[in-house]
Amino acid sequence: MLICLLVLSKSSPYHKFSSLLLFLGCNYIGLKIIFAFKIYFVFNIKKLTFVLIIFEIVHLN
C-alpha cells in the first residue's frame, strides 16, 4: 500500500489513475498497470501496442 502511494505521489501525470489503483486494491497487478501507463506516456507508444502490453501483463499472472 505504501509503495502505491509513493508511486502516485512521485508521478504527477498519473494522478488520474489513482482511483484505478484503489479499485484494484493497490496490489501487484495494479502497480504493473501503472508501470505500463508510465511506459506509454514516456515513450509515446501507439495505443494498440499499449493495449497489447496491458493484455500481456494481466495474463502473465
Image (tube, helix red, strand yellow):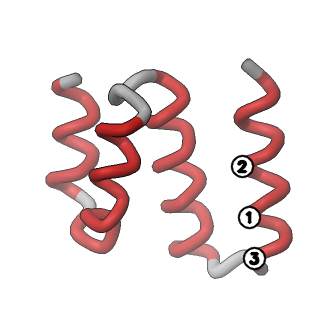
Using the image as rendered, state which of residue 5 and residue 42 is in the foreground.
5
> Is the C-beta separation of discs 1 and 2 under 8 Å?
yes
Residue in view at x 34 percent, y 29 percent:
26
- 54 w.r.t. 11: above or below: above
Query: Can you tell which quarter of the image residue 5 is in?
Result: top left
Disc 1/disc 2 C-alpha distance (Å): 6 Å
Q: Quadrant of the C terminus?
A: top right
Residue 48 coordinates in the image, percent (x, y)? 84, 72
Q: Amino acid at mark 1?
A: Phe
Q: How far apart are the two marked residues, 3 and 2, measured between alpha carbons?
A: 11 Å
Q: Which residue is at 77% across, 80% downward?
A: 46
**Residue where numbered disc 2 is placed:** 54
- Mark 1 lies on a secondary structure that is helix
Q: Is residue 28 left or right of residue 6?
A: right
x and y, in percent, of residue 3 in the image? 25, 29
CA separation in Å, label 1 and label 3: 5 Å
Answer left or right for 52 relative to 44. right
Q: Earlier in the sequence, mark 3 or mark 2?
A: 3
**Quick one: label 2, few (<14), some, or many (20+) residues within 10 Å?**
some
Instruction: Count how many numbered circles sit on residues in the image.
Output: 3
Q: In the rendered view of the protein, which quadrant contains the N terminus?
A: top left
Which of the 4 image quarters holds residue 47?
Answer: bottom right
Circle 2: residue type? Ile
Q: Nearer the viewer, residue 44 or 19?
A: 19
**Quick one: SS at disc 2?**
helix
Left or right relative to 57: residue 13: left
Residue that mark 1 sits on: 50
Q: Residues within 10 Å of mark 3 (few under 14, many from 20)?
A: few
Task: Report whether 47 appears left or right of 2.
Answer: right
* Residue 4: percent from left, percent from top: 27, 35
The residue singled out by tag 3 in the image is 47
Image vertical order of residue 37 relative to residue 31, above or below: below
